[in-house]
Amino acid sequence: MAVMGPDIRRMVGLLPQQPGVYRFRDARGGALYIGRATQLRGRVGSYWSDLRDRPHLARMVPRVTRIEATVCASVHEAAWLERNLLETSKPRWNRTPGGAETPVFITVDAGPAAPGLRVTYSPAPGGATFGPYLGGTRTRRAIAALHRVHPLAYTGKRLTGSERDLAAKRGVWPADRDRLVDALVATLCRDPDAVARAGEELRRLRDHAAAATRFELAGQLQEELAALDWITGTQRATVPDAGDLTIHGWSAGVLVRFDIRAGRLRVWSQRRCTASRAAPLLSATPASWSAFTQPNAELAAALAQS
């Protein structure tokens, strides 16, 4: 196991316990590896203490002299950013040019015959489509969670006898279809109140199952809660049809740059830059992106101080 030198220890200590993407560089500034983290400090620090699931990186770690990091608003956003960066440029020690998760969408089918939520691999015509989301399994868990809270499928005309019994037990009828569609759309649009209500109901069901010693169900509900967080958390790294944009942040002589192409944040770079040269770039960055670029510029400047 490589010994963590004082410079690396300082850089690791500056990383926040937030989701994000990290990049390792060598003494010549070459990119060695890009990864994502649920908690940046813990994940990055683990390379100098625990490589049990990453033994192939043992020869890389001693070469790391610089750590760069971008903080993301959610783990899902970090996953998309990592995927986009690796598809654009893969450092030597990364094995694959993108993540293992499959991009999928969720379509809300409001038709009276068989309403419900569907996983699709491209935006579906004739329905309200949301996404993309990374991971078909996780997205299907999120759909199961939403069905527990807003059982739109029970308002259809093609229910089996057992489904009609369950619908009656839940007090759900065809007349509820529009209300349930609205609630699902609000949740998938990340409306804070709708997301909070769905989470509260799932936690109530989880705690009730645990109190009744139905621990397998409680564990399933916990997984569904995590999946709901995955699809409803802020995710700006891949937004279809969002166009092209270059955004910047600056702090203490360090300029960070992110290139968005066809709605995908594909390039992340940073360099030394004076305040006067940075000023026009910052003024061209939309205010809606400053909450992303400015904290990351401040983190980049802190990490760059040797």
Image (cartoon, rainbow, N blue to C red):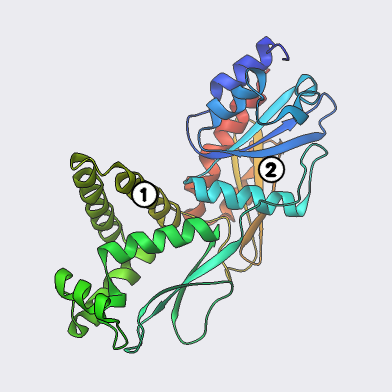
Disc 1 marks a residue whose amino acid type is Gln
Residue 190 shows in this picture: no
Q: Residue at x 61, y 64 (%)?
A: 263
Q: Position of residue 188 (x, y in %)?
A: 38, 65
Distance between the Cα atoms at labels 1 and 2? 53 Å
Quadrant of the rendered structure where residue 143 is? bottom left
Residue furthest to the right in view is 28
Look at mark 1 in the image and give the residue it sits on.
Answer: 220
Q: Which mark is residue 277?
A: 2
Compare residues 268 and 148 and report the one nearer the observer. 148
**Image spot of residue 108 (x, y percent):** 40, 76
Neighbourhood count class around disc 1 (C-alpha, 10 Å): few under 14, some 14–19, many 20 upward:
some
Residue 248 location in percent, x, y?
A: 61, 48
Image point 52% across, 80% down: which residue?
A: 124
Quadrant containing the C terminus is: top right
Q: Percent from the top left, x then y, of residue 150?
A: 26, 68
Q: Is residue 91 left or right of residue 217?
A: right
Query: Is mark 1 in CB contact (under 8 Å) with mark 2?
Result: no
Viewer-nearest of discs 1 and 2: 1
SS for callout 2:
helix
Element type at marker 1?
helix
Residue 252 or 78: which is nearer the viewer?
Answer: 78
Amino acid type shown at disc 2: Arg
Relative to residue 196, is residue 64 drawn left or right?
Answer: right
In primary-sequence order, the first of circles 1 and 2 is 1
Tell me: residue 274, above or below residue 169: above
Position of 211 relative to 188 (above/below): above
Q: Nearer the viewer, residue 158 or 232?
A: 158
Q: For the N terminus, give its image quadrant.
A: top right
Residue at horizontal 21%, vertical 71%? Answer: 166
